Amino acid sequence: MNYQLIIFDADETLFDFKKSERIALLHTLNDFDIQYDEAYHLKLYQEINQAVWKELEQGLLTQAQLNVLRFSRLGKRLGIGDDKNRMAERYKEHLARASFLFDESLDLVKSLGKKYRLIILSNGLKDVQNGRLRKSVIADYFEEILISEEEGIAKPDPAFFQLAFDRIGFTDRKGALIVGDSLSSDIQGGINFGIDTCWYRREAAPAEPHHSHPKPTYVISELTELLKILSIQ
């Protein structure tokens, strides 16, 4: 397949979101005089956060609801009362300032930008992703950075992909490839839209997707493997 457009997910694909998350949660809990225990608090927050994002992908809630709901649930587990709104806002502030690329991301994007059109589709909150993505050192290599809360739609909804195509005037679905770490949003979204998919299977992911999961066109465990895939197209 001769690709012309590479669509990237942002977090845990090009950006080290887990590092950002750790730092933002640490500062947020410190702001509320909660002695931070990473082994306990981070695990608890990630469990709650993953469940809430699944509900978003299933269309059960909006992104505005997501931001407060995850801290409402966290607050109940920690017994901290009615601070969910302030905590949610403080966390967003800290997270927006925590932007970290994976080591190989900059060189990869520079290399791909010489031959391919590049865009980012991110399921995220605009106040957070504006700071983390659009002000990053790789932002200028992308024609568009679309953030789900701004657009009112999110992966895996094919309408999000169609919006991206429309935004840059691209029409050839056979000429597009999405690269992302999430089977449920990136890979399922690409399949829903009828484009090829590349699953970035990070260390903690299973070697192969479960039979009930969407089947990607390609699977990589290092971002640089994408160059090998593209070199044979």
Image (spheres, rainbow, N blue to C red):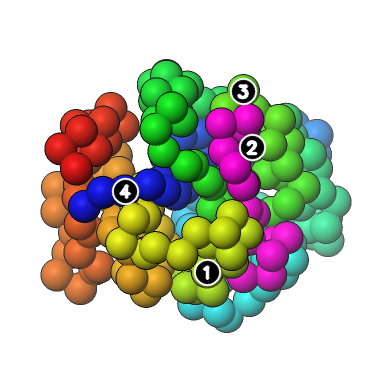
Q: Amino acid at mark 2?
A: Leu
The picture places residue 98, in percent across and down from the top left corner, at 66, 29
Q: Residue at x 39, y 63 (%)?
A: 172
Q: Residue at x 55, y 79 (%)?
A: 59
Q: Residue at x 40, y 58 (%)?
A: 186
Magenta includes 150? yes
Estimate the spatial distance between the alpha carbons at disc 4 and disc 3, rounded to whole Å.
25 Å
Sequence-wise, the earlier of marks 2 and 1 is 2
Estimate the spatial distance between the alpha carbons at disc 2 and disc 4, rounded to whole Å.
24 Å
Estimate the spatial distance between the alpha carbons at disc 2 and disc 3, rounded to whole Å.
9 Å
Task: Please tell me in which quadrant of the rendered image residue 112 appears.
Answer: top left
The picture places residue 5, in percent across and down from the top left corner, at 42, 48
Badge 4 is on which residue? 3
Front-most of residues 77 and 53: 53
On residue 162, which mark appears? Answer: 1
Magenta includes 67? no
Front-most of residues 36 and 89: 89
Judge the density around disc 2: few (<14), some (14-19), many (≥20) Cα neighbours within 10 Å. Answer: many
Per the image, label 1 sits on a secondary structure element best described as helix
On residue 133, which mark appears? Answer: 2
Give the quarter of the figure containing the C terminus: top left
Task: Please tell me in which quadrant of the rendered image residue 28 appears.
Answer: top right
| For discs 4 and 3, the disc positioned in front in the rendered view | 4
